[in-house]
Amino acid sequence: MSTLSALTEWVKHMWPLPLVLAVAMRAVIAGLVSRRAARDRKKLGLEIARLRGDAERAERERVHLELEIEKLMTKFERQQWTGTVAGQHIDVADLHDRPSPGDGTALSGRPFRSDWSGPPPPSQ
């Protein structure tokens, strides 16, 4: 029994050792967790910076595309307007190419005489 009493005596004097070991283990684990959290925060910070850069590039590209669309719409409207004006010009030119009433033909294409006194000719 002397071994048992010696062991009991040793445990009475060494009881703070498990507490010290528990505190030391807690500190080591907290340090590891803290390093891991810092590394994760750094990765997340880099990812956030990359995503912000992508968002800024996308916004610049969107603005650029809106400007391009605006330019194309303006160009299209200008071409449409120019085409309309050119069409009107062709119509006016076409009228000028027709023989005038003094040439013996009315604008309708029927013969024209200034001394016409009778009823209109029958429709053809």
Image: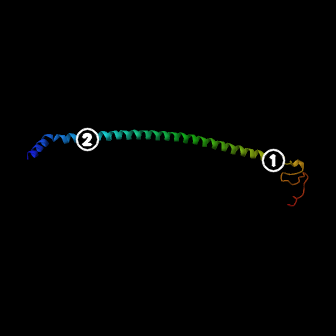
Residue 75: % across, % down: 66, 42
Camera-side residue of 101 and 109: 109
Q: Secondary structure at mark 1?
A: helix
Q: Return the residue found at the far right.
A: 115
Q: Secondary structure at mark 2?
A: helix
The colour scheme used to paint the residues is: rainbow
Q: Disc 1 designates what residue?
A: 94
Q: CA distance from mark 2 to mark 1?
A: 101 Å
Camera-side residue of 122 and 109: 109
Residue type marked 1: Asp
Neighbor class of circle 1 (other Cα within 10 Å; few <14, some 14-19, many 20+) is few
Residue type marked 2: Met
Residue at 14% x, 43% y: name it.
11
Q: Disc 2 designates what residue?
A: 25
Residue at 50% x, 39% y: name it.
56
Residue 98: % across, % down: 84, 48
Residue at 36% x, 38% y: name it.
38
